[in-house]
Image (cartoon, rainbow, N blue to C red):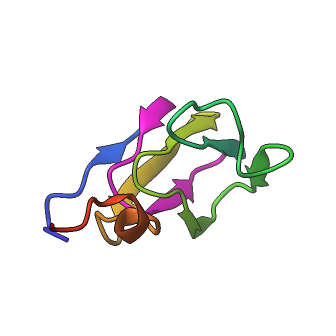
Amino acid sequence: MSSEANVYTSVSNVVWQTDRCQISTGSSSVTYNVLLAPSFADSIFSAPIQFPPYSAKAVYVGVGNKITITGSGFTATEFGTRTSGTAGVNEVPNT
């Protein structure tokens, strides 16, 4: 990945461009949830995941899925690969 990763301080239904997200919190806790492409009707989790204040963690999002982070005083950074775990399944083979 290039050194020009997207860094967010507000994330609401953002289509993620890499497979992972680094979430770093400040003095407040935040929650996050991931909706699966292509319909964005289903979540990866049964309920949003909560992060405590003053923490940092890498989480799986998946290329093309939407992530929402609720709270304030956080940063979310794209990192990892720009290919989906299902990229090989979805490609049309050469004929």
- The correct choice, above or below, for 23 with respect to 37 in the image is below
Question: What residue span does the magenta drawing correspond to?
Answer: 10-27
Q: Quadrant of residue 88?
A: bottom left
Quadrant occupied by the N terminus: bottom left
Instruction: Look at the image and say whether residue 19 sits in the magenta stretch.
Output: yes
- The correct choice, above or below, for 69 with respect to 75 in the image is above
Q: Is residue 83 left or right of residue 49?
A: left
Q: Is residue 89 left or right of residue 17?
A: right
| Residue 39 at x, y percent in the picture | 56, 30
Q: Residue at x 31, y 48 (%)?
A: 7
Q: Is residue 57 left or right of residue 28?
A: left
| Residue 57 at x, y percent in the picture | 58, 69
User: How many discs appear?
Assistant: 0
Front-lying residue, 38 or 61: 38
Q: Quadrant of residue 89?
A: bottom left
Q: From where the camera sits, is residue 79 visible?
A: yes
| Residue 26 at x, y percent in the picture | 58, 50
Front-lying residue, 65 or 26: 65
Q: From where the camera sits, is residue 11 visible?
A: no
